[in-house]
């Protein structure tokens, strides 16, 4: 039996601020206990599926990667019922066979950020969730099928190294990341993926390659102008991909039983008598399933 309560959240990265096919569109201000999200959230429908679209950097690209309130973004999406997230972001390629214009279905991360809060949990309520497999493989399979339908070139897996930014890499850094066997480099999927896992939301990352970072001897160093040119082309394909992905979500029978939805099972280590009511109340959206089960 299909789950009719599914709501698809789309976190749009650089170059993807709206999807023309969305219907009944309305921008809504959503509050969070963790501060202000990047922007208002676009409530809409696409082929009968409820969609919630959040511009990661804000409309007009006003937020740096380090200043995005990732906790507020994920908490806000969770509080309005989002069950699945598709993250769309621009990345540089660290491989000779990952070309500008290609898409990559990310399956692993290396987190090199250092100035961002990466967990909802805090003193008074401590939890350790598994990030061994940091993305939703179920929705990943649907993304690959949708890309095939749209004839979009997509690599079936890739390791995304997340740098702090906002500066691009030095050549030495780029060469080190290649030796680490990372495939693409970007600035935004961490701590986003970690927080989505703590929130028990299925998270899928689609990376759009815009450049060869700075390691490639036959390509110039990264420039904003070059990135924007590829982004414009990539954004059109991203919109096609999402439109073809939606029917898979509508017809999916396994969303409620996906392992992503049970990430907090056995994750909270704080003893019951020492749990902070203040922290529990602040995490009410994140802990909704566990709280419902305990009642």
Image (tube, grey):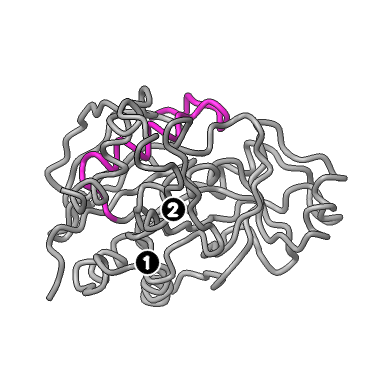
Q: Nearer the viewer, residue 272 or 283?
A: 272
Please give left or right for residue 102 compared with residue 293 in the image: right
Say whether disc 1 or disc 2 marks the residue closer to the N-terminus.
Answer: 1
Horizontal and vertical percent position of residue 122 = 47, 32
**Place of residue 117 in the rendered image (x, y in percent of width and height, measured from the top left):** 53, 32
The kind of secondary structure element at disc 2 is loop
Left or right: residue 213 versus residue 56 is right
- State the residue at coordinates (63%, 36%): 224
| Residue at figure coordinates x 16%, y 35% from the top left | 26
Quadrant where the N terminus sits is bottom left
Task: Classify mark 2: residues with Cα within 10 Å, few (<14), some (14-19) or many (20+).
Answer: some
Which of discs 1 and 2 lies nearer the camera? The answer is 2
- Gap in angstroms between the C-alphas marked 1 and 2: 13 Å
Q: Which residues are magenta?
A: 59-83
Q: In the image, which disc is placed on residue 267?
A: 2
Q: Position of 171 compared to 158: left or right?
A: right
Image coordinates of residue 114 in percent, x first then y, are 66, 34
Outermost residue toward the front?
Answer: 273
Residue 7 drawn in magenta: no
Measured as percent of width and height from the top left, residue 74 is found at: 37, 40
| The one of 40 and 203 positioned closer to us in this rendering | 203
Give the class, few, some or many, for how many residues have Cα within 10 Å of label 1's Cα (few <14, many ≥20).
some
Q: Are marks 1 and 2 in contact (CB under 8 Å)?
A: no
Image quadrant assignment for residue 97: bottom right
Q: Please tell me whether residue 259 is drawn above or below residue 77 in the rendered image.
A: below
Residue under label 1, please give it.
Answer: 259
Dot 1 lies on which element? helix
| Above or below for 76 versus 204 | above
- Residue 19, numbered circle: none
């Amino acid at each position: 039996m299909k789950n009719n309560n599914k709501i698809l959240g789309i976190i749009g990265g650089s170059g993807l601020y709206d999807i023309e096919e969305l219907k009944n569109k309305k921008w809504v201000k959503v509050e969070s206990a963790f501060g202000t999200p990047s922007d208002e959230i676009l409530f809409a429908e696409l082929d009968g599926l409820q969609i919630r679209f959040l511009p990661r950097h804000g409309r007009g690209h006003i937020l740096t990667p380090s200043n995005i309130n990732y906790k507020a973004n994920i908490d806000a999406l969770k509080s309005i019922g989002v069950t699945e997230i598709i993250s769309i972001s621009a990345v540089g390629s660290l491989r000779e066979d990952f070309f500008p214009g290609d898409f990559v279905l990310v399956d692993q991360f290396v987190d090199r950020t250092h100035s961002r809060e990466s967990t909802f949990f805090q003193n008074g309520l401590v939890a350790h969730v598994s990030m061994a497999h940091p993305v939703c493989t179920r929705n990943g399979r649907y993304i690959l099928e949708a890309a095939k339908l749209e004839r979009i070139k997509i690599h079936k897996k890739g390791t995304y190294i997340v740098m702090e930014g906002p500066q691009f890499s030095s050549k030495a850094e780029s060469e080190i990341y290649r030796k680490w066997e990372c495939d693409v480099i970007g600035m935004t999927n961490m701590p986003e993926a970690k927080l989505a896992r703590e929130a028990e939301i299925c998270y899928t990352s689609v990376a759009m390659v815009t450049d060869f970072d700075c390691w490639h001897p036959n390509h110039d160093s990264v420039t904003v102008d070059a990135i924007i040119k590829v982004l414009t082309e990539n954004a059109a394909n991203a919109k096609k991909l999402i439109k073809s992905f939606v029917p898979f979500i509508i017809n999916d029978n396994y969303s409620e039983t996906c392992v992503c939805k049970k990430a907090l099972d056995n994750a909270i280590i704080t003893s019951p008598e020492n749990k902070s009511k203040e922290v529990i109340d602040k995490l009410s959206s994140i802990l909704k399933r566990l709280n419902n089960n305990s009642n």
